[in-house]
Image: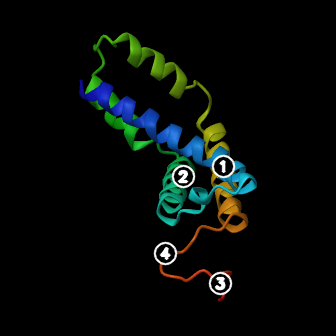
Amino acid sequence: MAALSIIVFHLAIIAFNVAGCVLVPIGAWRHWRWVRGFWWRLAHLLSLAVVALQALLGRACFLTIWQGDASGASHVQPLIAGWINRVIYWSLPLWVFAVAYVVVFAYVIVLWVCVRPRIPWRRETNQRRA
C-alpha cells in the first residue's frame, strides 16, 4: 500500500510539473491571472530544480528509491500501479534524463522571466489612479 501511495504521489508531482510548463505560457497568452501566482510558481520552479539537480548528480529520484524500498523485490504489483509505472519509468540511459530535466528547468527559468509571477509583498505598479 505504501508503494502505491508513493507512486500515485509521484505521478501527481509529474502532472504538476508538466501542467505548469504547459499552462503558464497558455495562461499568459490568455491573460489568466492565476498563472502569475507567486507561491505555486515558486513550488514549480523548486520542484524542477530538485529533479534537474538529482539527474545531474547521477541519482535516481528519491520518490523512485522510496517506492522501490516500499514495494520490495518480490512484490506483486496492483494493475493500476503497473500502468502508472509504465507511464513514469522509461528504460533510457540516465544521461538522457539529465539532459531533458536540465532543458526543462531552463525552460521554467525562461518562463519565470518572461511570465513574471506577482510578488506578494510588492504593490502592482500598473494600478489606475483616481
**Residue occupied by mark 4:** 120
Res. 125 mark: 3
**Mark 4 or mark 3: which comes first in sequence?**
4
Are the residues flagged by discs 1 and 2 in contact, CB closer than 8 Å? Answer: yes
Callout 2 secondary element: helix
Furthest-front residue in this view: 130
Mark 1 nearby-residue class (10 Å; few <14, some 14–19, many ≥20)? some
- Which residue is labeled 2 in the image? 48
Residue drawn at x 51%, y 62% is 42
Say which label, 1 or 3, has the lower sequence index.
Answer: 1
Q: Is residue 32 above or below residue 112?
A: above
In the rendered view, tell whether residue 127 sits above or below residue 93. Answer: below
Indicate which disc, 3 or 2, sits on the residue closer to the N terminus. Answer: 2
Disc marking residue 104: 1
Closer to the eye: label 4 or 2: 4
Mark 4 to mark 3 CA distance (whole Å): 13 Å
Tell me the amino acid under the disc marked 3: Thr
Q: Amino acid at mark 2?
A: Leu
Q: Which mark is residue 89?
A: none
Amino acid at circle 4: Pro
